[in-house]
Amino acid sequence: MIMPNLMKLTAIVAMTPERVIGKDNDLPWRLPEDLKMFKRTTAGHPVVMGRKTWDSLGKYKPLPGRQNIVITRDESWTEEGATVIFSPEGLQDLELQDEHVFVIGGAQIYQLFLPQLDEMIVSHVYKNYEGDTQFPEFSEYFSEYEVLETYEEFEVRRYFGLQAIYNDIRI
Ligand SMILES: NC(=O)c1ccc[n+]([C@@H]2O[C@H](COP(=O)([O-])OP(=O)(O)OC[C@H]3O[C@@H](n4cnc5c(N)ncnc54)[C@H](OP(=O)(O)O)[C@@H]3O)[C@@H](O)[C@H]2O)c1
């Protein structure tokens, strides 16, 4: 998969030290400050998510002010407020709200897009929570990070570097 050069792809995720991100198709924690940061950061941009994450949003879907793009293999799938694609490549055929696209999970969709990301915004939750869904190992993809914000229960980092260089030279 090669994304158009004009598109910027950022993943945004909250994870524990063991990279746990979900439990029973929900978040394992309640961190209102993280939800506010997520909303601030993604406002006005397209968000790409897996069908299970879409389902997990319950009454909060579609996420307001953002083009909600949902990936599923089910070609008959349709829901109000969702723009549907059937593969990551489908993203390239869409008319996007904005060229800065956020990949918002879950684990399967992070895994699909990881090699194509320009950067990641990660809320590192200090406490360990039990869960059934884990973010993939990502250290090989980024050479640098900066701390953006710190809170009592988590720290927000932006990962970048290495991969952006690869992305610049891809043809
Ligand atoms: N901590 C965080 O920041 C964060 C963020 C987001 C989500 N989460 C959590 O993550 C969990 C959900 O993650 P998940 O990995 O189970 O599910 P997911 O990635 O949200 O969605 C998986 C679904 O995406 C579709 N899909 C996957 N690969 C595809 C491909 N190659 N082509 C087309 N469609 C494809 C399939 O949908 P169909 O089955 O319809 O074909 C698949 O069942 C939940 O617990 C959620 O709360 C956490």
Image (spheres, rainbow, N blue to C red):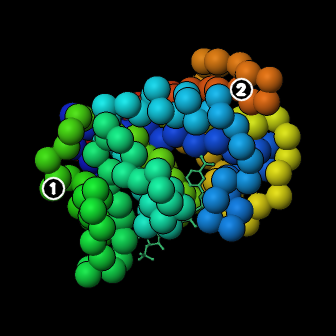
Residue displayed at 52% across by 34% down: 38
| Residue 106: % across, % down | 54, 57
Q: Quadrant of the N terminus?
A: bottom left
Image quarter of residue 25: bottom right
Give the residue number, with chain letter if any, for mark 1: 93
In this image, 67 relative to 35: left or right? left
Of mark 1 and mark 2, the one earlier in the sequence is 1
Residue displayed at 85% across by 40% down: 127
Q: Nearer the viewer, residue 128 or 67?
A: 67
Mark 1 to mark 2: distance in Å?
A: 35 Å
| Residue 95: % across, % down | 14, 47
Residue displayed at 21% across by 39% down: 97
Determine whether the residue tagged by mark 2 lies in a helix, strand or loop. strand
| Residue 100: % across, % down | 31, 33
Q: Quadrant of the C terminus?
A: top left
Determine whether the residue tagged by mark 1 lies in a helix, strand or loop. helix
| Tag 2: amino acid | Glu
Give the residue number, with chain letter if any, for mark 2: 155
Establish if 162 lies above or below 149. below
Image quarter of residue 130: bottom right
| Tag 1: amino acid | Asp
Q: Badges 1 and 2: C-beta atoms under 8 Å apart?
A: no
Establish if 150 lies above or below 109. above
CB at disc 2 and ligand 1 closer than 8 Å: no
